Amino acid sequence: MSKILIADDDADSRELLRYTLASLGHEVTAVSNGAEALESAQTLPPDLIFSDILMPEMDGFELCRAIRSDTKLRLTPFIFYTATYVSAEDEKLAMDMGGSSFIRKADDVADFLPMIQEILRRHSQHELPVPVASKEAVAELERRHTETVTRKLIKKVREIEQINREKTLILAAAGEGIFSLDHDGRHAMVNAAAASLLGYTVEELVGARSHPTWHHHRADGSPFPESECPISATMKDGATHRSVEDVWWRKDGSPIQVAYSCSPLIEDDEIRGAVVVFRDISKRKEAETALQKSKDLLQSVVENVPARIFWKDRELRFLGCNSQFAKDAGRAGPDELIGLSDFDMPWRALAELYRADDKAVIESGAPKIGFEEPQTTPEGDTIWLRTSKVPLPDETGQVIGMLGIYDDITERKQAEDEIRKLSQAVAQSPESIVITNLDAEIEYVNDAVLSATGYQREELIGRNPRILHSGKTPPETYRTMWNALVDGHPWKGEFINKRKDGSEYAEFAIITPLRQADGSITHYVAVKEDITEKKRIDAELSQYREQLEALVRERTAQLAEALENAEAATKAKSAFLANMSHEILTPM
């Protein structure tokens, strides 16, 4: 295989060609300019030279002429390989200078590999001609070379000038402050944004030393020695120094909060100065302060809201909670729960139940609101919760977890159970129970009222109890009742009422004011018993009692008369015996 030398200042192009030729088994040396190529060729003569044209130090034309002028190298095949000189005139000049071939870089490398092989073959068999120019031709080539190079240089200068203009425009348009410093720390270049942010003109800053101008004090107002300044350190240690938050000082003495990066300018391994890029972060700091206040407010709300709050990630691990939730979990504070799961909590037996709800909320993206569930306390007791869970989205709307909030409703559940029992007792009571508001409008009747009166519930609700009046209850009874109720006292008494079918019945009623926690009366509750049958029995008993009493009186009179008669007979008998005794004892 052949030894091939490549000269190209374009690293990517040079490496591609080197790799391609090396993969074919050739021994390849690659350098970045003509001077290095000439030195390499003179040290280790190659079998073939590839050369770009426009390169630093020595271009391709000069390299080709030097190769052709060297007695040891003049027969070496020389291929021009360029992306800059691509015109027919450029190609003719290259060939006249002694080129063996002319290849444009836009061509596919694989397309000219056969040509390379052919050149190497012809060279090995001494079949490859080498152009030999006369002195006049050489002079002409010199002239054409000079013109070409001059033309290209002018073009390059214009390109550089255009680039410089664009850089100037970019620097002027940049919203960030940009300036360069020389090795003494003086402003060498300052863009408009930097001057404006610092309150100076560009002219005022150029030539002025940076540290005494705007970095002379720290944020707390204490002096800032230049020896401790990171920007000054860059020009000593050659390292890039950055600060995400610092304070500089404007011309008017006001502080400006900045973030900056300071990079060294190195030339010939010497630090020539530095470039500083900075931006005003005052608004960002204000936003951060406002955000922190919002976070503090939110944390205060989370901590003080009368509910337990917690949030989890997609793996259902706790990310945070408020203190009340931590207390329910038997922990000293919210930090102790971070990274744990429901399996680490006192309610681990219910973990699967909770996690199933969490997973459903995260996967569906839909909240689950106001459902009841049990929870085990650290003491092993069971309490009841009213829970709501919602998905937690990130700024893109992607669900990254869930948030839950719940109340302990154990006491309410117990109260509801008591109310339910009481309600059932009232509803199922054999006694008639009526509840009215303060305007005597019926709001509730139990089934016993419906059975006693013959009305349907909807016929009584909203009506006044006088719908049951028969007109036979004495008016004084109602006056006495209302006087007692208005004074807040219970009342009991009897009514003669009338059913829906017109039949009458007697009721014994106990009516009580219903008071709220503050003592105010909101309703009246009447518990009534149908005493019609009782009164009928009492009437019969009274009649029986009167009959019995009359009979007793009659029998008593008869007994008294008999007794009187007996007593009279006894007296007569006693008188008779007395007389008989007297006669017997008296002598004749």
Image (spheres, rainbow, N blue to C red):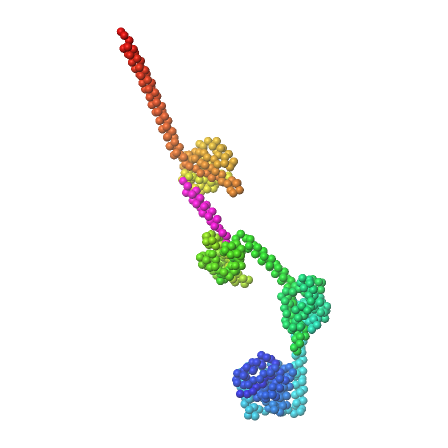
Of 198 and 76, the residue lying toward us: 198
Q: Residue at x 72, y 68 (%)?
A: 204
For residue 560, side relative to residue 88 (left or right): left
Q: Find residue 294 and report its image quarter.
A: bottom right
Q: Find residue 70 and report its image quarter.
A: bottom right
For residue 193, side relative to residue 113 (left or right): right
In the image, residue 556 sits, relative to residue 337, either above or below, namely: above
Range of residues picked out in magenta: 406-430
The kind of secondary structure the magenta stretch mainly shows is helix
Can residue 278 be seen by looking at this rendering? yes
Q: Residue at x 68, y 75 (%)?
A: 272
Expressed as whole percent of the image width and height from the top left, the position of residue 116 reads 55, 86
Q: Residue at x 63, y 68 (%)?
A: 242
Quadrant that contains the C terminus: top left
Can residue 173 be seen by looking at this rendering? no
Expressed as whole percent of the image width and height from the top left, the position of residue 507 reads 42, 35
For residue 24, side relative to residue 428 (left or right): right
In the image, residue 163 sits, relative to residue 381, either above or below, namely: below
Expressed as whole percent of the image width and height from the top left, the position of residue 307 reads 52, 53
Say whether residue 426 is magenta: yes
For residue 570, side relative to residue 34 (left or right): left
Most extreme residue toward the top is 588
In the image, residue 3 sits, relative to residue 295, either above or below, namely: below
Of 384 and 345, the residue lying toward us: 345
Say whether residue 54 is magenta: no
